[in-house]
């Protein structure tokens, strides 16, 4: 996640901490709160409106924050009812949310350029299709897949945090390690 996205996430977290719910409508940032938020939160949202909107738009899932929270709670409850300790159930549920987020946002790209580094095919480093026939392919060099996928996972995690779903403390940030998700 880039510096601008990290800053936007910090601002969203600060707004949520004082009871502000954020959403977007076109190019407008909508705030809901039971009481007036502190001026420093409003100032930060004003200064970084573009970055906050970009982060909230980074995942186009068709679900509201409330629906993402329900999805998470349903997955955690099922795992907990299945015998897992609560924390482990929440880790699994969060992982399911990340996977759902990635699946709802497939990446497609042209076959003549790597969608991560922008380079073309080179001798010994051909462009390969990643993805499925139905969703389309993201073309990239095999060495570019891991950083690209880690970036996508970080976007999904940031989006879920912006939706009010806390990242479990020991959530494994290693999907790319074993080719999962």
Image (tube, rainbow, N blue to C red):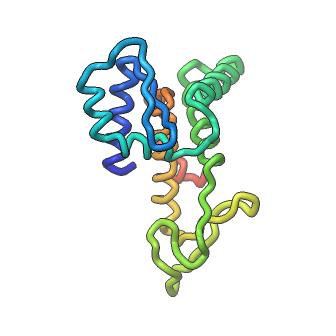
Taking depth in this image into account, of 148 and 169 the one nearest to the observer is 148
Q: Residue furthest bottom?
A: 123
Taking depth in this image into account, of 172 and 115 the one nearest to the observer is 115
Residue 155, percent from left and from top: 47, 46
Tally the marks: 0
Q: Residue furthest right?
A: 134
Q: Residue furthest top?
A: 35
Residue 152, percent from left and from top: 51, 51
Q: Would residue 181 be seen by someone viewing this image from the given angle? A: no
Query: Which residue: 46% across, 33% down?
Result: 162
Residue 175, percent from left and from top: 54, 48
Taking depth in this image into account, of 20 and 106 the one nearest to the observer is 20
Residue 112 shown left or right of residue 154 in the figure: right
Residue 68, percent from left and from top: 60, 30
Residue 52 shown left or right of residue 68 in the figure: left
Q: Is residue 140 above or below residue 66?
A: below
Q: Would residue 3 be seen by someone viewing this image from the given angle? A: yes
Residue 107 shown left or right of residue 147 in the figure: right
Taking depth in this image into account, of 53 and 55 the one nearest to the observer is 53
Query: Which residue: 48% across, 27% down?
Result: 164
Q: Is residue 138 above or below residue 98?
A: below
Query: Which residue: 31% across, 41% down?
Result: 48
Query: Which residue: 65% across, 65% down?
Result: 137
Quarter of the image where one finds residue 98: top right
């Amino acid at each position: 996640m880039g510096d601008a996205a990290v800053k936007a996430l910090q601002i969203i977290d600060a707004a949520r901490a004082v009871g502000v719910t954020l959403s977007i409508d076109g190019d407008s940032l909508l705030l809901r709160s039971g009481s007036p938020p502190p001026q420093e939160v409003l100032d930060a949202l004003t200064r970084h409106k573009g970055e906050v909107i970009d982060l909230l738009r980074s995942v186009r899932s068709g679900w509201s924050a409330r629906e993402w929270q329900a999805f998470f709670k349903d997955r955690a409850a099922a795992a907990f009812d299945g015998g897992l300790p609560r924390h482990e159930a929440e880790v699994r549920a969060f992982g399911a949310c990340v996977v759902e987020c990635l699946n709802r946002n497939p990446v497609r790209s042209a076959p003549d350029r790597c969608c991560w580094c922008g380079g073309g095919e080179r001798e010994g480093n051909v462009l390969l299709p990643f993805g499925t026939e139905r969703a389309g392919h993201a073309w990239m060099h095999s060495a570019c897949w891991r950083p690209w996928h880690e970036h996508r996972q970080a976007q999904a995690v940031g989006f879920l945090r912006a939706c009010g779903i806390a990242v479990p403390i020991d959530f494994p940030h290693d999907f790319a390690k074993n080719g999962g998700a």
